[in-house]
Image (cartoon, helix red, strand yellow):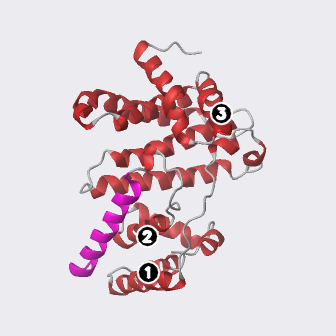
Amino acid sequence: MPILDVPKMALFRHFTETTASTIRPEPTLQKVWTFDIPRLALNCDFLLEAVLALSALHQYCISPPELKHRSVGLLNKSFTMHHNSISAFSHQIKNIDASNFGATLAFISLISAYSFGISNIIPSDYEEQHIDQLLEVIRLAIHSEELFKNYGHLLYTSPLSAAIIPPDYGSPPVTEEHRQLLHASLNRLNNASRDSVADKQVYSVMILTVGDKELAQRMAHSQVRRDFFRLLFQKRALALLIVAEIVALDDKPQGTHVPWYLWQWNKKLAGFIQRSKYVLHNEGW
C-alpha cells in the first residue's frame, strides 16, 4: 500500500467523499465508487494516479470563479497525475485477465471522465484543444475494445461492471427527416471536397451511420471504419465533422443525470459543428 503525502491524501479523501458520488448517482452503486474502487487504487499505481487526477480536476471545476486563479496549481497537478496514470498503465498492463480486470475497467472509466472533463476548462474558441479531447476519448474507446476483445465475458460477470459501465439511457429519437437533412448536408460537403475518390467513398459510407446506431454497430469491425479512423486522427475536416454530428446526436434525454465532467461538452461540441459548417461552406476546402 502506498504512503500518500498530505496533498495526495486530501485529494484521495475528496474523491471518496465527493467526486465518487458524482460519477454514478444511484444509491445502490455508491459503495463501489466510494469504497471498492478506492480500495483497489491503494494497491494499483495507475488506478491511484487516475483517482487523484480526476479528484483534482473536479476540485478545480467546482471552485468558485473568483477563486479559480488560486487553483491553477491544483489543475497543473491534475495534468501531471493524469499523464502519470497513463504512463504507468501502458507499462504495467499488456493483457487483460481476471486479476487486473476490475482495476483496468475502473481506470478506463476514470480517464475517459477526465478527458471529457477537460472540456470544462477549455475556452469555447479553442476548437483545436476541444477536438483533441474528443479524439482522446475515441482513442481510449478503440484501445478498450482491443484490450477487452478476448475477455468480453468478464464484462457480464465482474461485480464492478454494473457500477463502472455507464447505462444506456437511450438518446432522443432521430426523426427520418432530421437524419435525411444531416445526410444531405454532409454529402454536399463531401461532393465539394478535394479529397481523393477513395476517401470520399469512406465518408459516404460513414455518413450513413449518422443517426443510425444499428448500422454503426454492424460496421464496428469493418475496414471502412478503420479507414475512417485513419482520416479522423489526421484531423481531416469532414471526418471531424461527421464524428461531431454523431456525438451530438447521442445526447442524454432531458432530466437525465449529467455529471460535472459533461457540463460543457455538448455545448462546446455544438459550437464546433456550427463553426465548421460555416467555414466549409464559405471558405471551401
* Left or right placement of residue 72 versus residue 173 in this view: left
Q: Quadrant of residue 237?
A: bottom left
Q: Residues within 10 Å of mark 3 (few under 14, many from 20)?
A: many
Which quarter of the rendering shows the C terminus?
A: bottom left
Which mark sits nearer the N-terminus, 2 or 3? 3
Residue that mark 3 sits on: 32
Say whether marks 2 and 1 touch (CB < 8 Å). Answer: yes
Q: Is residue 232 above or below residue 118?
A: below
Residue that mark 2 sits on: 245
> Would you say the magenta stretch is mainly helix, strand or loop?
helix
In the image, 121 versus 47, the foreground residue is 121
| Residue at the spot 30% in from the left edge and 48% down from the top edge | 122
Q: Mark 1 and mark 3: span between their CA atoms? A: 41 Å
Start-end of magenta stretch = 264-285
Q: Residues within 10 Å of mark 1 (few under 14, many from 20)?
A: some
Q: Which kind of residue does numbered mark 3 sit on?
A: Val
Which quarter of the rendering shows the N terminus?
A: top right
Residue that mark 1 sits on: 182
Which mark sits nearer the N-terminus, 2 or 1? 1
For the question of whether residue 14 can be seen, the reply is yes
Q: Is residue 239 above or below residue 282?
A: above
On the image, the x and y values in percent for residue 61 come to: 36, 38
For the question of whether residue 151 can be seen, the reply is no
On the image, the x and y values in percent for residue 202 come to: 49, 77
SS class, disc 3: helix
* Left or right placement of residue 54 versus residue 146 in this view: left
